Image (cartoon, rainbow, N blue to C red):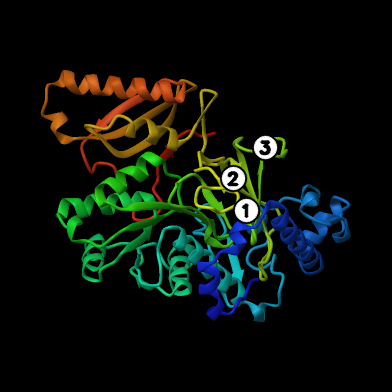
Amino acid sequence: MAGVALENWVERIRDPKMECMSRDEMASLQSERLVKVVKKVYENVDFYRNKMKELGVEPGDIRGVEDIGKLPFTTKEDLRDNYPFGLLAVPKREVARVQGTSGTTGKLTVVPYTQNDADLWGECVARCLTMAGLTADDIIHVCYGYGLFTGGLGLDYGAKALGAMAIPMSSGNTKRQMMCMEDFGATAFGCTPSYALYLAESLQEAGVVDRLKLKAGIHGAEPWTNEMRKKIEGILHINCFDIYGLCEILGPGVAQDCIHHAGLHIHHDYFFPEVLDPATHEPCADGETGELVFTTLTKEAMPLIRYRTKDLTSITYDKCECGRTTPRISKFTGRTDDMKVIRGVNVFPTQVETALLSLGGAVANHYMLIVDRENNLDVLTVMVEVDESMFSDEIRKLDALRDKIAAVLKQALGIAVRVKLVEPKTIQRSEGKAIRVIDNRKL
């Protein structure tokens, strides 16, 4: 169904019959598409043909999704090794655009799109926007970055497919963001959750929240907690939604939660999900946490087979209160590459965030984890912003708060940590993806 004409999109988005198929009906569609995509990459991509031959697998061995375990995995390292167009499955003249990651840890991850791929992207994001209650009458303020990063263009394409107005602000210049959000009458905005919190606090400090027309926030690109969602919602009096995607698979729009916030609905007619044990690669039971793995079922330019996302989640297939029958993944506990092993204990930034937000009161919503090694022992320091009034109180009150935070974190993480209390706005704010961990160990 990739490449559906624009005039047919709105009808499909308003009546998402693909989202209400029975599991057997969807498995039949997925199987048909999987067989086609496996044949395509085998015939057109040397990487996959060689991988399949190594495993003794031919396209004819894949008769449906029940055979997906026979296929090889794909990793981000494979994309970098085949930079820039080694995984291209169509002639280069059919590529309409490319997107990519920042490449801060090596070569860029370059992802080409045909025009049909770009149209599919817009449709998927539009489906997500409808899950947030948005329609063609809405004005969507997009403060994700534009360019190779998929955030800005993804929301832009989705607004266009929905027929809504897009305000392509991109990231940065918070004062201008605030001015345009008010002056243009934005009813929704999209950005990373960390920037959404920063923007919400800035709007609150400026005293303009009550003059805004916002009703929804669309946030993704980094793990965040329900506690953080409720904090943003409480400041802006809106409903916030967790949109998920990654450049390698499509961009934002692969999944999103609905108004019930009971998991993120995957557009499984386009993306086949697996949740696997990261060590054994065996399927996890429904509700059991593992690594999310995707196979693209309709992408043309660069289909991916069993792409290991490194995102940790669980999956369920029961019907949602909203009526959708699509599989739902839980909010991410983190990424396998975000996880830090400290004195033998697995630590994720989201665990720290949940613990801190549970304290409320004088504890702010901004923190930083710093990992050092002293005398061959790992040491975790958590910097936490607290209300500046705490620094004018008696020193014993500050000490008592530090001890309380340390106790809560020890209970949450299972290890003792050092807590450093700092004044508001001491920790650097991010307009893109937040940097939550600094690891100074030389491992």
Q: Residue at x 62, y 42 (%)?
A: 291
How many C-alpha atoms fall within 10 Å of the one at disc 2: few (<14), some, or many (≥20)?
some
Q: Secondary structure at mark 1?
A: helix
Estimate the x, y position of residue 418 in percent, counting from the top left. 35, 24
Name the amino acid, label 1: Lys
- Residue drawn at x 16%, y 35% is 388
Label 2 sits on a secondary structure element that is strand
What label does residue 310 carry, if any?
2
Q: Distance from label 1 to label 3 (Cα)? A: 22 Å
What residue is shown at x 78% (from left), y 69% (from top)?
Answer: 44
CA separation in Å, label 1 and label 2: 10 Å
Query: Which-is-in-front pick, marks 1 and 2?
Result: 2
Choose between 126 and 144: the one closer to the eye: 126
Q: Quadrant of residue 358?
A: top left
Amino acid type indicated by mark 2: Lys
1 and 3 marks in contact (CB < 8 Å): no
Quarter of the image that includes the N terminus: bottom right
Mark 1 touches mark 2? (CB < 8 Å): yes
Q: Is residue 345 left or right of residue 35?
A: left
Residue in the image at 53% along x and 80% along y: 7
Label number found at residue 284: 3
Task: Please tell me the numbered disc located at residue 76.
Answer: 1
Question: In this view of the protein, which residue sits in the foreground, 118 or 368?
Answer: 118
